[in-house]
Structure formats: structure tokens, C-alpha cells
Amino acid sequence: MALHKAVAESSIEEMVTLLDSGVELDSQNDNGQTALYMAIRTNFEAGVDLLLERGCDVNIANNYGDTPLHLVVFKSNVRLLKKLLSKGALPECKNMMGQTPLQVAVAWNFKSGVQLLLDSGASAEVKNTALDMALRTGS
């Protein structure tokens, strides 16, 4: 998990060296997290940008079914949300709790994220819908 270590240390130089040497871009740690997921989790945006430029898979879920898209929505990061969607992140993916990124955005009152996800084709009509969640939480 050398790439994960480089991400944890926020070392672009080490990431480039590893990626240039052919390290697996989408390997997962024991929690199912890819280097992309870890870079998002630690707010290492330069690392996120590098991994996206190198063509990482933006739809790999961790052991809980959370994808990088779930995480950027949870963190209310508009810039990374736009980047992931532009790289093919699936707005309809569900985690182990059955939540889509749209439902997470509603739960965390991430209004600009809700709009971006809807504009990207996310459905508000999924079972346990965003509307249902908003009514329960008073959002």
C-alpha cells in the first residue's frame, strides 16, 4: 500500500514516482479505501487531482459501500463533486445503508451539492428518497 502511504503523507512527489513505476492505481486497503478515497478524506486535493489525471476509477466503493462521491458530498466539497461527476462518478450508487449521494447531500443540507447531483441525473425518486429524508429532518 505504498500509494496509500504517499497519500497519507501528502507527498505528490512520492505519488508520481510510484505511479510512474506502475503501482496499481486502484488498490484498496483493509477498509476498502482506494488512494482516491483517502486523498478526499484527508483533504489532499492535489493528490485527488493527480489520481484523477492518471485515470483512477471514481466508482470503487469501500467496505461500507461508500464511493468517493458519497465522501465528497459528506464533506460538502463542490469543487471535487464537480470533478468526480465530470470523470464519470455514478450519482445513483448506493452505500450499505441504501443511501445515494443525493440522499447524503440532503441529510447534510448540502444544497449546492443537491442541485449538482440532480443536474447530473440523480433521481429524487429512489426508495428512501431525498424528499422523504428532508421531511424527516426538517430540511
Image (tube, rainbow, N blue to C red):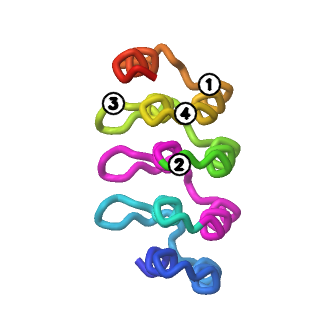
Q: Residues within 10 Å of mark 4 (few under 14, many from 20)?
A: many
Callout 4: SS: loop
Residue receiving disc 3 = 98
- In three-dimensional space, the C-alpha distance between marks 1 and 2, rounded to whole angstroms, equals 15 Å
Task: Nearest to the eye among marks 1 and 3: give it.
Answer: 1
Is tag 1's residue or tag 3's residue first in the polypeptide sequence? 3
Callout 3: SS: loop
Q: Position of residue 98 (x, y in %)?
A: 33, 30
Callout 2: SS: helix
In percent of the image, x 37 and y 52: which residue is there? Answer: 62
Residue receiving disc 2 = 72
- In three-dimensional space, the C-alpha distance between marks 2 and 3, rounded to whole angstroms, equals 17 Å
- In three-dimensional space, the C-alpha distance between marks 1 and 3, rounded to whole angstroms, equals 18 Å
- In three-dimensional space, the C-alpha distance between marks 2 and 4, rounded to whole angstroms, equals 12 Å
Is tag 2's residue or tag 3's residue first in the polypeptide sequence? 2
Is tag 4's residue or tag 3's residue first in the polypeptide sequence? 4
Under mark 3, the amino acid is: Gly
In the image: residue 70, left or right of residue 57: left
In percent of the image, x 54 and y 64: which residue is there? Answer: 43
In the image: residue 114, left or right of residue 99: right
Q: Which mark is residue 118?
A: 1
Residue receiving disc 4 = 91
Under mark 1, the amino acid is: Leu
Callouts 2 and 3 close, C-beta under 8 Å: no
Instruction: Specify the segment rendered in magenta.
Output: 45-74
Magenta region includes residue 7: no
